[in-house]
Image: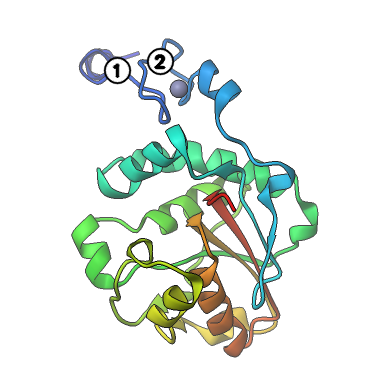
Amino acid sequence: MGFFASLLDLLFPPKCVFCVKVLHEKSDQWCDKCVESLPFTLNSGRQDGAYYDFCISPLYYKAAVRRSILRYKFRGASGYAGVYGKILAECIQENPDIGYDLISWVPLSDKRKHERGYDQAMLLSLATALELGEVAVETLRKTRNVQAQSELGGAAERRENISGVYEAADPELIEGKCVLLIDDIVTTGSTLEECADALLSAGAARVVCAALARGEV
Ligand SMILES: [Zn+2]
């Protein structure tokens, strides 16, 4: 290891993305304790959708997973995308019936992307695709900024909030294709339904989804 790399490790020791404890093995990104104790879902947390076939999620959105994703989304920890991508890719490989042609993501509005500096679902999608030996492509655009879904209550209210805000970025690209849509968190599924509706309306054949973490029902 070069001098500067050693210095960086001394100043910024690698930490577990979930519990933020300093890691001893530099190659790891999460600690043994978290590997054992994270709230993994059973059967990939599969949930059926109306516009999308189903959504799989390896983790529940709670405890250390929730705190980690909040750092990823709101505290600039964009580097977590790598380890998240590995976990999500593994979950996708465990569900071969997911059968997709394209990997894509739920986009942020330009305003939100500008505020945050990065699009966290896009980074997650790119990292996941990389793990699967593929490339994620943009299929949707968010045409206007709306209130954050997490600030709203029930499914009906959430669906109303985002009604008609997504549009296909390039209908030719998705024509007749099965799109695997990736997001960081799925709760009621309203956002994924709206995105899937936009993709199917623009000519996609099927939509399946994968989210890093899901809410508990
Ligand atoms: Zn840990």
Residue behind label 2 places its C-beta within 8 angstroms of ligand 1:
no
Q: Choose between 101 and 165: the one closer to the eye.
A: 165
Q: Residue at x 55, y 57 (%)?
A: 135
Q: Residue 112's spot in the image, x, y percent? A: 25, 65
Which kind of residue does numbered mark 1 sit on?
Pro
Q: Is residue 105 above or below residue 61?
A: below
Residue visible at 38% across and 66% down? Answer: 149
Indicate the quadrant where residue 41 lies: top right
Which amino acid type is marked by label 2?
Leu
Task: Tell me residue 117's x, y (percent).
Answer: 23, 56
Tell which circle, 1 or 2, labels the residue nearer the N-terminal end. 1
Q: Is ligand 1 less than 8 Å from the beta carbon at label 1?
A: no
Which corner quadrant holds the N terminus?
top left
Disc on res. 202:
none
Most foreground residue, 28 or 163: 163
What colouring method underlies this structural image?
Answer: rainbow
The CA span between labels 1 and 2 is: 7 Å
| Location of mark 2 (residue) | 23
Which residue reaches farthest top?
Answer: 24
The answer to which quarter of the image holds residue 76 is top left
Q: Secondary structure at mark 2?
A: loop
**Ligand 1 image position (quadrant):** top left
- Do tag 1 and tag 2 residues touch (Cβ < 8 Å)? yes
Relative to 217, 155 lies left or right: left
Residue 101 at what x, y percent from top left?
68, 67
Q: Which residue occupies the foreground of this view, 61 or 142?
A: 61
- Percent position of residue 29, x then y: 45, 26
Give the number of callouts: 2
Residue annotated with mark 1: 13
Q: Residue at x 70, y 54 (%)?
A: 46
